[in-house]
Amino acid sequence: MTILVTGATGFIGSHVMRRLVAERRPARVLCRQIERLDADLRGNGSVEVVVGDVSDPEVMRRACSGVSALLHLAAGMRGSSEDFERSTVTGTKVMLNATMAEGVGHVLYVSSMSVYDYAGLPPGTLIDEGAPLERHPEAREDYARTKRLAEALVLPHLGSAAPTFCIVRPGIVYGPRYKNGLEHVTSLRRAGGLFLLVGGGRREIPLVYVENLVDALLLLLDDRSCAGRIYNVIDSDPPTERDFLETLQRVTARRVPIVPVPSSLVRPLVQAAEWRRRFSRRGGMDLVHGFQRVTGNIRFDAGRLQRELGWKGQHAFVDAMRASFGSEPAPALALGATRESQAAVKA
């Protein structure tokens, strides 16, 4: 039975497609530009290519026709706010209509752990699938804002019988061929190569190695007992920011000074930057809200997938870090915040 993959030219999608091809499973991809698809997929007899935009109803219906399952990875990653809206929100709305019209059996919708309300949670909160969702998506940067809005479109369909739906919320995905994938945990950088750990580096990072994520996605595509369920997907025992940085230094053989910085010292700078943003009437995310999201001491859990379907990441953290970064110089990372607070620091 054919599996449709949207977003197949992206980082996660390309890894999914390589696995499907390796397992000789019939697949169809929807992509805007065929030249962005991996060259070894374009001429592969087991891969059918539909060219067009995910927000085009006619194209989406054609892509959905005759497929047994859909893995929806397509989402805006760059461009204007309108680009994010079209690719993520409108694309998801069009996808929902097309899957119902064409009789797709099962839809695996890939959301993000960015949909949770980190800023509003008390210290020590465990983020599982029942944690509160972001109440103020308008305060977020475009990617997180539109992912939250798009998931809200899917949630009412979780009880559907035709098609069945499952929502996956991956953590921060990293792996080979995506060396900039950890900008989500970077914020502060200083000349001279210092790593500044805002809050001291005790905060957990919800990382998931891309091959472990692909294992989970294929499991959820095949096992229809997941219908109507939501699953976080992160690797077991998520590292703290300090653990991550120290491991990064070991696998790259580069020692860089680590300087803990109390959040209380950075917060006034972020508040001042936010006041300046509002005074100048510039658009964009709320910098204080973003800072609160990425500096709170919260924990992460993905135990439901292991308990219910037996999934466990096969690639250990150190091995995954070595595979991802071992052959390259250490990236200039400064942990303690995500790209949501980068603007605040640079302002």
Image (cartoon, helix red, strand yellow):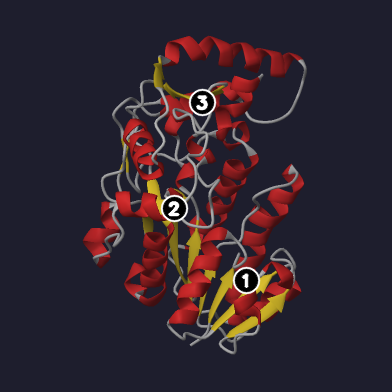
Q: Inspect the image, locate mark 2, and give the three-letter code of the amino acid beneath it.
A: Ser
Q: Tell me the CA gap for discs 3 and 1.
A: 35 Å
Residue 41 in the image: above or below residue 88: below
Residue at the disc numbered 1: 38
Q: Residue 347 lies in what quarter of the image?
A: top right
Point out residue 335 in the picture as x, y percentages from the top left corner. 45, 30
As drawn, the label of residue 324 is 2
Residue 6 in the image: above or below residue 343: below
Mark 3 / mark 1, whichever is N-terminal: 1
Q: Is residue 86 at all visible to an observer of this figure?
A: yes
Do the numbered discs 3 and 1 sit on residues whose CB atoms are within 8 Å? no
Residue at the disc numbered 3: 193
Q: Inspect the image, locate mark 3, and give the three-letter code of the amino acid beneath it.
A: Gly
Other-residue count near label 1 (Cα within 10 Å), few / some / many at <14 / 14–19 / ≥20: some
Residue that extends furthest to the front in the rendered view of this protein: 253
Mark 2 / mark 1, whichever is N-terminal: 1
